[in-house]
Image (cartoon, rainbow, N blue to C red):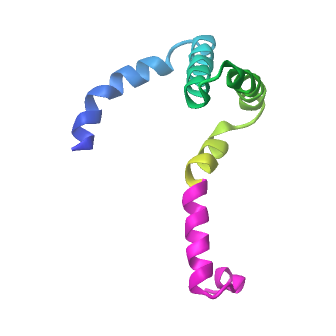
Amino acid sequence: MLVIIDLPMIRPWVQQLQAPYRFLYLAVRLLCAIGSYTVANSPVAVLPAALFSVLGLGYAFKRLEPAPMILGFALGPQLEDNVRRAMRASSGDPMLFLEP
């Protein structure tokens, strides 16, 4: 069902990716500012978000490859849960990860 819903949205997403980087950069910064304001309900929370967006989007993503960082943020919590589950099943023995 989700595939049927997402198929018509492929063209708009691809068109958004063809936009110049400076527009995408501003859109991401604006969405980050709106999100940080709504979470904390305080304009003071927007300042660290603006600082880190300048550092992250302006420096790190131009110098470093962003794909591993995005995968790390997306898969990190799932990895932690599974490692914790495996350690609990092995009674805390880390050699579980080295055994074939």
Residue 82: in magenta span: yes
Magenta-drawn stretch, dominant element (helix, strand or loop): helix
In front: 78, or 20?
78
- Please state the horizontal and vertical placement of residue 81, each as a whole percent of the image: 56, 66
| Residue 67, placed above or below residue 77 | above
Bounds of the magenta span? 76-100
In front: 15, or 59?
59
Instruction: Report the label total.
Output: 0
Q: Quadrant of residue 69?
A: top right
Instruction: Residue at 74% x, 28% y: name it.
Output: 52
In front: 91, or 79?
91
The N terminus lies in quadrant: top left
- Please state the horizontal and vertical placement of residue 34, each as a whole percent of the image: 56, 20
| Residue 99, placed above or below residue 53 | below
Instruction: Residue at 22% x, 38% y: name it.
Output: 4
Q: Quadrant of residue 88?
A: bottom right
Residue 77: in magenta span: yes
- Please state the horizontal and vertical placement of residue 84, each as a whole percent of the image: 61, 72
| Residue 88, placed above or below residue 47 | below
The C terminus lies in quadrant: bottom right
Instruction: Residue at 32% x, 27% y: name it.
Output: 9
Instruction: Residue at 65% x, 84% y: name it.
Output: 96
